């Protein structure tokens, strides 16, 4: 006897095996829960159902009931309720599981459906896998090995369709490879809310194209490339660059805004080739913005800082760090020896939680005021938020700041003008871009830790190069107060120390405690000191992140508007 | 047995000298009197009359009209729409066009009665793009009716209001499929919808409950409202009530449209007596009895089995000529009554070439949405075209059958059946012609024009 189930679960039978699934689960997902794969092309869990590829046809049966009395009809042979099998195969994507639903995926009839759909999809397909970018991650290729005939019965001429169509600035289309699944059409309409794709012509001559005068130019266009089950839509940036099976995948986080979309970084031998979204149903589903996919180009940018320097002259990391310590502790001549009153720290909302923690420790040691650079832009209501700092909340959580950053560093600016600041420690922030003037910077000594050259690095007395997000590991806190981790994808630039090493060195040299410079060493300290991070460790942090208790900061006027899976909390003050 | 006389119910005034399509003429012949009487009754009564009449849809599927109406979701609070399917596109069918051209008010009256019965406030006549004249005639008829307070607000002084709009298609067979039609009416590409969940009775036009009825079906509704459902069942045969219009085309002496009581005339009587038999010196070879997607019948084959007559099961042993022309009998022998388009072929026709023609049509008309129909229809077309215009191979017959078998029952809409049944049935009935085509072709005359 089966135990009664919780009200939101129902029992279905997949290939003879009973399994409990949530109500409303469609047959593909129900089968997935029973570890049975139902092949499909057009179905995508995050898009509306179109049911056009017909690859997911299965046999479906429902428990038999007496039409008049609705009483179950029993099969005397088995003692179980009889099952009425539908005479025709049913698409698994469009049918939701109902109590007692039976699904058969392993019969000859289902096999024949899959075989015939595969044959139909291949007859007009160019079969150019050897030169196709999708090879290796192509559903058509995978299912053809499982359900293909191995030879072709098609002796006619294949259809000819447009090749190398530029659908937009980032997407190239090969219509001959298209299997007309309409995922890209539905994505553009439903998720990107930029309805520009559609089909022209009829029957087998149907052709995917943009509406006249339109382009697939929205900031989510590359998701259509990820969605495309075949090699029809390809990334203009990535195509022909690398075979996907050579690439290593590293879980990462999109650092372009406080949304913190989960990403996958694809690299080979220390070189990144592309970034794609990583599924996180609480954050970004399976999407990410195009703008976040090109961030890897910063790793090998020409203006990358690769060496430490003192007053513009290249030097070693050790000497630069020593110079920084001298400046900060007053031995550099700018500040009276023993006095720490003239130092200001500019922290960053782009730094990791661990770096922010160390920065706070340094600021505490120096008793220096901390400013955070604000980066505000308009949000797109999808996956790019108004706060372009990926880790503003990390700075709050670690106690680096207590209030949201003000625009243009105005307090610091006033302090410089008043002669109260002689040394600025900038963690990765371009102070000129953040609102200070060149004249103001001329009045102070700047210690700059950063990845790229900018107006601040050129005037800084001490420059210490740091790593990009792809070359280090750490955690970030997104707009939902979700602590998310990312992993090092590629080795750091030669001769450049990890940010944590530089920061902990500074802290130690300034007389602070020895906290260690690795995540493993730092996290016990962080967990012990920061209440909302108690019992957290980097290693045990789930890949989908950990939602933190944000009650402490509930009253702050965060600037983010609504995005996917995020609704701004109404300010506490509104309550009567 | 001599053929019965025609029973002209729907076509009562078609081709009648002096009968015109304007309102005055229609009213002179008693037009809109039925509607006036019907509006005095309760809508539920009218639905019951239609249910009692056993009226089956005349668009092709023969689905009971009363059942269709009873499936409509009346509790949703959303408006209910009625769509008149005037997208008559099935090759071999030309009945609705004559109703629209010569007796449009009959259609309007039937439509208004159906609307009243189902509490519909807005109806659309979706007319095939290739029928511009019909669209103009309907527009004029609606304008006349509106001027006479027969369409529009407070019809005939009652509290009931109903608008009828004409919408022209852009020329696609698939718009005759009801959910494709709805998509097209909504201004989209006519891709049929998946069912479930998009049954028109629940989630139809603009996601509201919708009734889609064929032109002829709605004209029958008028006559049912007139004579009552019980009296209507006296016409025709049980389960195949009323009259059927047969559009006979092809190799007969007198092609045309004929209206008979359903099931009271056999195919042989229709072709030999009513239509005058084959052309001089020719013999019938094959007939498609219900529009080009229906399965073909070969003269000379016999059908045996048991059928229900009243409560009893009786043996039948029919030749093609003996089959009564009704939905059930034609269904029993493996084809269908469909839309009533009877396509006749005599012994001058080569079946490979005939199928090439049909396949070309369906490949051209497949909407391209779902895989089996999209790819299968064009593949079959490419094979038959190659056989006719290029090299025919002995193995093509088996290949064609195999391709056709991979389509029906696996598609979103019934087009999968429509495009594969011709090939399946041509192969089943005339397989030898396909196998030997490479040889027969050598002796054939100059090639036909390219399809």
Image (spheres, coloured by chain):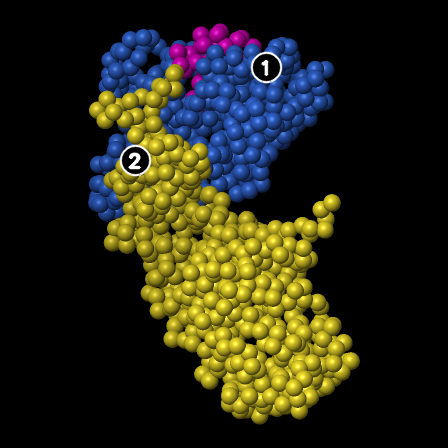
- The chain coloured blue is B
Q: In this view, does A474 lie above or below B73?
A: below
Q: Colour of chain A?
A: yellow
Q: Would you say residue A100 sits in the magenta stretch?
A: no
Residue B437 as seen in the image, left or right of residue A96: left
How far apart marks 1 and 2 lie (CA) works out to 45 Å
State the image coordinates of residue A388 (x, y, percent, origin top left): 61, 65
Which tag, 1 or 2, sits closer to the chain's start? 1
Looking at this view, is A348 or B274 the one in front? Answer: A348
The residue stretch that appears in magenta: B223-249
Q: Which residue is drawn at 35% across and 50% down?
A: A121
Quarter location, residue B107: top right
Q: Residue B424 carries which label?
A: 2
Q: Where is residue A185 in the image (x, y as percent from the top left)?
A: 51, 51
Disc 1 + disc 2, Cβ < 8 Å:
no
Q: Which of B120 and B202 is in front in this view?
A: B202
x and y, in percent, of residue A270 in the image: 41, 75
Q: Residue B138 carries which label?
A: none
Q: Are marks 1 and 2 on the same chain?
A: yes
């Amino acid at each position: 006897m089966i135990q009664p189930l919780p009200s939101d679960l129902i029992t279905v039978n997949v290939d003879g095996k009973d399994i409990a699934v949530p109500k409303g689960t469609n047959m593909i997902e129900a089968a997935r829960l029973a570890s049975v794969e139902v092949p499909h092309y057009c179905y995508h869990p995050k898009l509306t159902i179109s049911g056009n590829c017909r690859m997911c046809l299965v046999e479906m049966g429902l428990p038999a009931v007496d039409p008049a009395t609705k009483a179950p009809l029993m099969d005397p042979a088995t003692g179980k309720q009889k099952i009425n099998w539908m005479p025709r195969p049913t698409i698994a994507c469009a049918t939701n599981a109902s109590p007692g639903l039976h699904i058969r995926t392993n019969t000859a009839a289902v096999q024949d459906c899959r075989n015939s759909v595969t044959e139909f999809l291949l007859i007009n397909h160019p079969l150019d896998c050897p030169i196709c970018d999708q090879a290796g991650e192509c559903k058509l290729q995978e299912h053809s090995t499982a359900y293909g005939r191995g030879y072709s019965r098609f002796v006619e001429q294949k259809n000819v369709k447009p090749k190398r169509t530029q659908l937009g600035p980032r997407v190239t289309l090969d219509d001959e490879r298209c299997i007309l699944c309409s995922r890209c059409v539905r994505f553009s309409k439903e998720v990107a809310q930029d309805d520009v794709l559609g089909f022209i012509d009829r029957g087998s001559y149907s052709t995917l194209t943009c509406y006249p005068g339109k382009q697939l130019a929205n900031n989510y266009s590359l998701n259509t490339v990820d969605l495309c089950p075949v090699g029809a839509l390809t990334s203009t940036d990535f195509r022909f660059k690398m075979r996907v099976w050579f690439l290593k995948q590293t879980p990462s986080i999109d650092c372009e805004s406080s949304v913190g979309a989960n990403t996958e970084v694809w690299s080979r031998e220390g070189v990144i080739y592309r970034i794609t979204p990583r599924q996180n149903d609480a954050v970004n589903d399976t999407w990410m913005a195009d703008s976040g996919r090109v961030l890897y180009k910063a790793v090998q940018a020409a203006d990358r800082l690769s060496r430490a320097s003192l007053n513009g002259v290249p030097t070693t990391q050790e000497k630069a760090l020593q110079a920084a310590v001298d400046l900060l502790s007053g031995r550099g001549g700018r500040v009276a020896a023993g006095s720490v009153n003239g130092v200001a720290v500019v922290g960053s909302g782009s730094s990791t939680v661990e770096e922010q923690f160390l920065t706070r420790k340094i600021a505490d040691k120096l008793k220096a005021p901390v400013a955070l650079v604000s980066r505000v832009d308009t949000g797109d209501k999808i996956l790019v938020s108004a706060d372009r700092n990926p880790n503003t909340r990390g700075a709050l959580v670690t106690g680096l700041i207590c209030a949201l950053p003000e625009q243009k560093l105005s307090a610091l600016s006033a302090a410089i003008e008043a002669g109260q600041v002689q040394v600025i420690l900038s963690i990765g922030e371009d102070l000129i871009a953040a609102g200070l003037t060149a004249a103001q910077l001329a009045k102070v000594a700047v210690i700059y830790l950063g990845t790229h050259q900018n107006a601040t690095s050129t005037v800084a007395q001490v420059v210490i190069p740091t790593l990009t997000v792809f070359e280090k590991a750490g955690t970030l806190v997104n707009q939902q107060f979700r602590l998310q981790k990312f992993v090092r994808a590629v080795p750091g630039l030669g001769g450049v120390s990890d940010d944590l090493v530089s920061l902990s060195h500074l802290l130690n040299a300034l007389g602070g405690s020895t906290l260690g410079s690795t995540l493993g060493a730092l996290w016990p300290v962080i967990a012990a000191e920061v209440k909302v991070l108690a019992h957290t460790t980097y290693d045990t942090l789930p890949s989908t992140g950990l939602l933190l208790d944000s009650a402490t900061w509930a009253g702050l006027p965060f600037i983010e508007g609504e995005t996917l899976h995020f609704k701004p909390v109404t300010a506490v003050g509104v309550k009567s | 047995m001599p053929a019965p006389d025609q029973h002209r119910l729907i076509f009562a005034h078609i081709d009648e000298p002096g009968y015109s399509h304007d309102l005055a003429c229609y009213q002179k012949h008693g037009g809109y009197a039925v509607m006036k009487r019907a509006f005095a009754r309760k809508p539920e009564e009218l639905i019951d009359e239609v249910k009692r009449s056993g009226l089956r849809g005349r668009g092709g599927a023969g689905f009971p009209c009363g059942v269709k109406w009873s499936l409509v979701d009346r509790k949703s609070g959303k408006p209910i729409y009625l769509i008149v399917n005037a997208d008559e596109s099935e090759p071999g069918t030309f009945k609705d066009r004559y109703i629209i051209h010569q007796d449009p008010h009959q259609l309007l009256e039937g439509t208004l009665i159906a609307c009243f019965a189902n509490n519909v406030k807005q109806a659309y006549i979706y007319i095939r793009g290739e029928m511009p004249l019909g669209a103009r005639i309907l527009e004029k008829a609606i304008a006349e009716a509106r001027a006479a307070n027969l369409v529009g607000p407070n019809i005939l002084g009652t509290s009931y209001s109903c608008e009828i709009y004409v919408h022209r298609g852009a020329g696609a067979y698939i718009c005759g499929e009801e959910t494709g039609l709805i998509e097209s009416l909504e201004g989209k590409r006519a891709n049929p919808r998946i069912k479930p969940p998009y049954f028109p009775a629940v989630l139809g036009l603009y996601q509201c409950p919708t009734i889609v009825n064929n032109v002829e079906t709605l004209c029958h509704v008028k006559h049912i409202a007139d004579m009552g459902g019980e009296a209507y069942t006296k016409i025709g045969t049980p389960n195949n009530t009323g009259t059927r219009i047969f559009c006979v085309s092809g190799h007969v002496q007198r092609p045309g449209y004929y209206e008979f009581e359903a099931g009271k005339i056999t195919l042989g009587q229709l072709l030999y007596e009513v239509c005058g038999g084959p052309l001089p010196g020719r013999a019938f070879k094959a007939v498609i009895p219900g529009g080009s997607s229906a399965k073909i019948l070969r003269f000379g084959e016999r059908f045996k089995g048991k059928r229900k007559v009243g409560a009893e099961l009786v043996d039948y042993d029919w030749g093609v000529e003996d089959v009564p022309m009704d939905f059930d009998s034609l269904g029993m022998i493996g084809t269908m009554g469909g839309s009533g388009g009877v396509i006749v072929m005599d012994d001058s026709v080569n079946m490979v070439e005939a199928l090439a023609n049909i396949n070309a049509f369906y490949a051209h008309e497949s909407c391209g949405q779902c895989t089996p129909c999209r790819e299968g229809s064009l593949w079959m077309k490419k094979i038959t075209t190659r056989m006719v215009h290029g090299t025919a191979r002995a193995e093509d017959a088996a290949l064609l059958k195999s391709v056709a078998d991979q389509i029906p029952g696996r598609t979103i809409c019934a087009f999968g059946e429509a495009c594969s049944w011709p090939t399946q049935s041509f192969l089943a009935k005339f397989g030898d012609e396909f196998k030997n085509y490479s040889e027969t072709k050598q002796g054939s005359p100059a090639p036909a024009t390219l399809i």
